[in-house]
Image (spheres, rainbow, N blue to C red):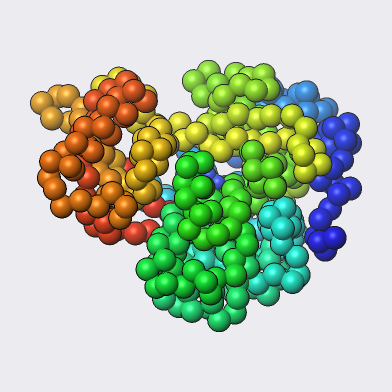
Amino acid sequence: MPNYYQPEIETASREQILAWQNERLVKQVQHVWDNVPYYRAKMEERGLTPADIQSVEDLHKLPFLTKADLRDAYPYGLLGKPLSECVRIQSTSGTTGRRVVAFYTQHDIDLWEDCCARAIVAAGGTKEDVVQVAYGYGLFTGGPGLNGGSHRVGCLTLPMSSGNTERQLQFMTDLETTILCCTPSYAAYLGESIAEAGLRDKIKLKAGIFGAEAWSEEMRRDIEQSLGIKAYDIYGLTETSGPGVAYECSEQSGMHINEDHFLAEIIDPDTGEVLPEGSKGELVFTALTKEAFPLLRYRTRDICVLTRKPCSCGRTHVKMSKPMGRSDDMLIIKGVNVFPSQIETVLLEQGYPANYQIIVDRVNHSDTLEVMVEMSPEKFSDSLADIHEEEKKLVAALKTMLGIYAKVRIVSPKSITRSEGKAVRIIDKRKI
Ligand code: DLL
């Protein structure tokens, strides 16, 4: 039995989970009312007091928080504990506007690491494992989160951070790493590098825990093949601690949300209306146990579906689908909604690697979409006629998926820059 499986929590009955959530929500709303004037003012605007929130049923009455609120309240406006009780910050990689800074008490860090430990155990991790953490360390939550979780499980933890691929492979082979944690795009790159270096026989990996960016089922299959592992998804965001809000189990059909800590809702992104279970919409989280950064009804912008279908692993916590893109990542091209994940699905289905870029521009007042993808070594051809034929096939497949024309450019292998963290896949020149 793995030493960090928590069946009393992870397989608790729905009634038990609801009882925890009701009790914790009431307590958390009081905590926020007493300590976060920014949110208290939002509640007062609606004529609400903590007495109006008696259970999860009342959650919908509370106002939302958005990234704009985090920016308004930057840096200390949403803090729920005195600074003297905070021991850490983490921050988003945000490229525009002010960064989002999240705060942690020691208690918050302990709970965060518990959540990451559950993810490692769900991927088959035990204290016998050697875990290579190749997410970035520092302000990004990936490295510190999985590092903490790995310690809790008792694994030998390699705090590699991202990059320096040669050194990653050396440690992976010398120390016989069994579990790899990094972004899926970096995992794919490591897979390529292992094949190139002829190291496949020396790799002892059995599992990978990959997240922080969108990745398709086709990409999962490619990574599983190239690394000879089972690849598990993990989800989270800085605002709610970091990785470990939700994670995949052996069934690999959605990620169990740690519902004892995070209360999830799905809303219509346009109206804010709460949608019934099984609907596709924007994921909203209420942190039930966080002290220093206790966000209530935080809009993630991630679009997904929640399901309570029984899971073969025995866990009872609700599952979220892979995010189907972010409502703010969705491209609107000639009035048509295009999610980058749809393009990735077509490319991988047609036998191309996940090394691609989407370039959007506006020419003569009309939007243009171009997809640049690397030729896979198996399809390598010097013949321009062959390449042109292949491009035509891709144009047709993309048209079927998206309903609009996309120009396709097949480029030589290795010509698109590899990513060690989150991949940059979209270049929207309309915004530049
Ligand atoms: O990416 C935390 C994390 C680190 C998650 C390591 C998993 C592993 P942020 O930098 O704040 O935090 O970015 C959060 O990344 O709102 C999603 O849009 C996206 N994201 C995170 N995990 C996944 C995933 C970390 N498994 C934002 N699939 C989120 C798709 C993901 N998108």
Work out whether residue 264 can be spotted: yes
Q: Which percent across, then down, holds residue 349? A: 40, 38
Work out whether residue 340 can be spotted: no
Give whichever of 424, 298 is nearer the camera: 424
Give whichever of 120, 391 is nearer the camera: 391
Q: Which percent across, then down, holds residue 278? A: 65, 23
Q: Residue at x 70, y 47 (%)?
A: 249
Q: Is residue 12 above or below residue 228?
A: above
Give whichever of 419, 166 is nearer the camera: 166
Q: Which quadrant holds the N terminus? A: bottom right
Report which quarter residue 14 is drawn in: top right
Q: Which percent across, then down, holds residue 69? A: 52, 39
Give whichever of 205, 282 is nearer the camera: 205
Q: Is residue 352 above or below residue 165?
A: above
Q: Residue at x 72, y 58 (%)?
A: 124
Q: Is residue 311 left or right of residue 386?
A: right
Q: Residue at x 51, y 41 (%)?
A: 217
Q: Is residue 205 left or right of residue 99?
A: right
